[in-house]
Image: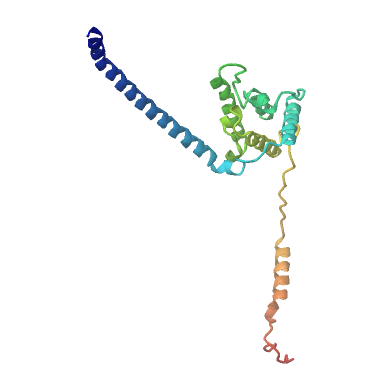
């Protein structure tokens, strides 16, 4: 009888615990759903970003990456690194030094060590500096592309774009990266040359000083001289 009373007395406590667990589980489920929704939204936005569609499935090109490393080493006057490509560039220190060589004073502060947030600031300063230098915004990688290794080919593309833009800066006479940009081939003509060209066109069309094809009959007719 004593044991039975104890058991009955414990029933409300059991129910309360059960409902608390159910309520807690419902809250956790809601939080997880919200987090999942946000994650899917962020991933979708990232992969549907217009400037990444072209490079979404682009494989890494080791030869291009080595060319970039060789160029960086030549610009900085340092031996070419043997470290993995993405590790060498990840903290943004080398990138900031690179743009400071191309355009002195572009990055005022370089965080040599620190938290991930502080190191990511190096990358952001580099991005702002190269945009000012002339690299098109659509060719500049996002911080996560490098720091989280989401899109290393985009990083390489950006650095090639930077190497290309140096050709527009005559003050830079150092090493180049990538093919030479096409130069403008502007030609100027005198009034006399333009008039002569216009006369030549008119002659070809049969309208030179009243000349025409009026003497020519229809198809199959004899032309009257």
Residue 135 visible at all: yes
Q: Is residue 162 above or below residue 216?
A: above
Q: Nearer the viewer, residue 84 or 201?
A: 84
Question: Where is residue 212 drawn, in percent x and y?
Answer: 68, 82
Question: Where is residue 155 drawn, in percent x and y?
Answer: 64, 34
- Looking at the rendered image, the quarter that the C terminus falls into is bottom right
Please name the residue shown 69% across and 88% down the image.
219
| Residue at the farthest top position | 2
Please name the residue shown 33% across and 24% down the image.
22
Please name the residue shown 73% across and 51% down the image.
185
Q: Nearer the viewer, residue 50 or 169?
A: 50
Q: Is residue 53 above or below residue 69?
A: below
- Looking at the rendered image, the quarter that the N terminus falls into is top left
Quarter-wise, where is residue 217 in the image? bottom right
**In this rendering, would 15 be left or right of 67?**
left
- Count the marks: how many? 0
């Amino acid at each position: 009888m004593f044991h039975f009373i104890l058991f009955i007395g414990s029933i409300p406590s059991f129910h309360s615990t059960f409902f608390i667990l159910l309520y807690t589980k419902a809250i956790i489920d809601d939080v997880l759903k919200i987090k999942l929704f946000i994650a899917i939204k962020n991933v979708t936005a990232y992969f549907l970003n217009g400037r990444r569609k072209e490079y979404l499935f682009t494989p890494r090109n080791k030869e291009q990456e080595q060319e970039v490393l060789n160029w960086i080493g030549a610009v900085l006057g340092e031996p070419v690194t043997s470290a993995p490509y993405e590790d060498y560039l990840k903290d943004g220190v080398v990138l900031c030094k690179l743009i400071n060589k191309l355009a002195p004073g572009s990055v005022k502060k370089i965080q040599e060590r620190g938290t991930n947030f502080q190191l990511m600031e190096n990358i952001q300063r580099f991005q702002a500096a190269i945009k000012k230098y002339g690299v098109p915004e659509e060719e500049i990688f996002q911080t996560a592309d490098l720091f989280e290794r989401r899109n290393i080919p985009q990083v390489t593309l950006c650095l090639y774009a930077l190497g290309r833009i140096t050709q527009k800066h005559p003050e830079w006479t150092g090493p180049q990266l990538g093919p030479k940009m096409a130069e403008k081939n502007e030609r100027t003509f005198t009034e006399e040359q333009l008039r002569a060209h216009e006369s030549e066109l008119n002659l070809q069309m049969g309208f030179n000083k009243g000349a025409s094809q009026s003497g020519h009959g229809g198809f199959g007719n004899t032309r009257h001289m």
